[in-house]
């Protein structure tokens, strides 16, 4: 039995192409979602996975339709395989019910992991180079040094609450706490 799953990221996008391809592939049931791939909770995918029985195959139009990330895709496919179920991607011609399909999927996974590690390495090298030039990353502070001094004095005087200090300086309570706690004398 072939179970289809189709997903688009926004309501402006159309599922028709995916649905046509899944029908042509022979899917007896098709589940769908309109949700970003980054979102964990996708009802259509959950329903498709729940409809699967041993020997069934989950069919998607493209790999990126099935999972949030390559790691998530591998988890989904591994979970299906452990239950005696398959996975098929029409566009990439991957079918884990065959040895060649499982091999192809693992090659994609290895390349994805390699790419992720390269990105992390380049990012860390760039941050180190920026630090060596005296640049510090992160969001700029909301308070000027003078405002931080005022916040510290008001905080230490204990005549105003943190909420009142924050309102006075037009910032959040968290900004006040970060400001007073980064100084050695802060509490």
Image (cartoon, grey):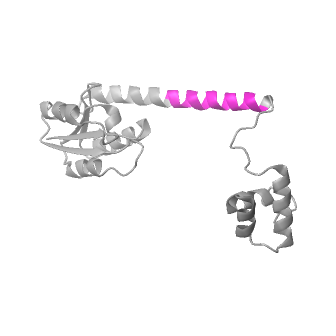
Which range is magenta? 114-131
Helix, strand or loop for the magenta stretch, by majority: helix
Displayed quadrant of residue 80: top left
Magenta stretch: includes residue 124: yes
Displayed quadrant of residue 64: top left
Magenta stretch: includes residue 180: no
Residue 33 x/y as whole percent: 28, 45
State the residue at coordinates (84%, 50%).
145
Quadrant in which the N terminus is drawn: top left
Residue 21 x/y as whole percent: 18, 30
Identify whether 48 is placed above or below 152.
above
Q: Is residue 82 left or right of residue 69?
A: left
Q: Is residue 21 left or right of residue 174?
A: left
Residue 177 x/y as whole percent: 74, 61
**Of residues 71 and 42, the one drawn nearer to the viewer in this rendering:** 42
State the residue at coordinates (14%, 38%).
27
State the residue at coordinates (57%, 29%).
119
Q: Is residue 167 left or right of residue 67?
A: right
State the residue at coordinates (81%, 66%).
187
The answer to whether residue 183 shows anywhere in this view is: no
Identify whether 100 is placed above or below 65.
above
Residue 35 x/y as whole percent: 34, 45
């Amino acid at each position: 039995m072939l179970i289809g799953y189709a997903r688009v990221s926004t309501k402006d996008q159309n599922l028709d192409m995916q649905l046509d391809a899944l029908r042509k592939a022979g899917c007896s049931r098709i589940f769908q979602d309109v949700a970003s791939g980054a979102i964990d909770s996708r009802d259509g995918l959950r329903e498709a996975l729940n409809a699967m029985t041993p020997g069934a195959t989950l069919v998607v139009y493209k790999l990126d339709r099935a999972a949030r990330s390559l790691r998530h895709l591998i988890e989904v496919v591994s979970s299906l395989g452990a239950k005696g179920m398959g996975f098929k991607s029409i566009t990439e011609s991957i079918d884990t019910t065959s040895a060649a399909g499982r091999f192809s999927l693992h090659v994609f996974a290895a390349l994805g992991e390699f790419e992720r590690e390269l990105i992390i390495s380049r990012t860390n090298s760039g941050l180190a180079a920026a630090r060596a030039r005296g640049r510090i990353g992160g969001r700029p502070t909301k308070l000027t040094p003078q405002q931080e001094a005022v916040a510290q004095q008001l905080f230490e005087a204990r005549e105003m609450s943190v909420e009142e200090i924050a309102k006075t300086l037009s910032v959040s309570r968290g900004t006040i706490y970060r400001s007073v706690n980064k100084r050695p004398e802060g509490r």
